[in-house]
Image (spheres, helix red, strand yellow):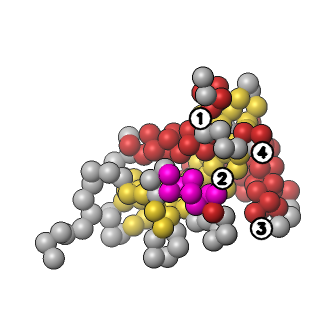
Amino acid sequence: MNQSDLVTIRKAQARDADAIAEFNRAMALETEGKALLPELVGAGVRRLLADASLGFYAVAEHEGRVIGCLMVTNEWSDWRNGLFWWIQSVYIVAGWRRRGVYRRLYDFIRDLASREPGICGFRLYVERENMVAQHTYAALGMAPTDYLIYEELKPGVRYFDDRG
């Protein structure tokens, strides 16, 4: 059995706010060397959890402990008449990295989107130097854009006129 099979993926709830805020602080420090203000990050996490119009978090949980998360926010695309889900604030606890936890979170988001006809795809941004993350995103089907943003369009939906 793969260790990630022992992980439960679900939408975050208010009780997850402290863990998510701590993950955001850890991620900012690890990836950008920035020490975020705990009270500001905590308030931002709680606000999103309380207002679904801002987006949502998905969390990975093992034996009642949150071990990873990601945030999804919306971007309207008039070109596609649909929403892109932006994946942000990705964090996996160090001992669980490279064990399929992010893949499970991403698959959860894909599944949710497959049931929402208004979602046209996913986007995220990644540091240019973070080659490990870039390889992970590419392995999941995402590709770099001309804007240095990664995206994956929902399969089977036509957005452009192919007639030249």
In the rendered image, the quadrant that contains the C terminus is bottom left
Mark 3 against mark 1, which lies toward the viewer?
A: 3
**For the residues marked 3 and 1, what is the alpha-carbon distance in whole angstroms?**
28 Å
Q: Earlier in the sequence, mark 2 or mark 3?
A: 3
Which residue carries the number 3 mark?
A: 32
**For the residues marked 4 and 2, what is the alpha-carbon distance in whole angstroms?**
12 Å
Which residue carries the number 4 mark?
A: 94
| 16, 66: nearer the viewer | 66
Q: Earlier in the sequence, mark 4 or mark 3?
A: 3
Q: Earlier in the sequence, mark 3 or mark 1?
A: 1
Q: Amino acid at mark 1?
A: Arg
Which residue carries the number 1 mark?
A: 10
Residue 81: x and y in percent read 32, 63
* Segment tinted magenta in the rendering: 132-139
Mark 4 against mark 2, which lies toward the viewer?
A: 4
Which residue carries the number 2 mark?
A: 90
Q: Amino acid at mark 4?
A: Ala
**For the residues marked 1 and 4, what is the alpha-carbon distance in whole angstroms?**
20 Å
As drawn, 38 above or below 144: above
Question: Residue 1 is drawn in which quadrant?
Answer: top right
**For the residues marked 2 and 3, what is the alpha-carbon distance in whole angstroms?**
14 Å
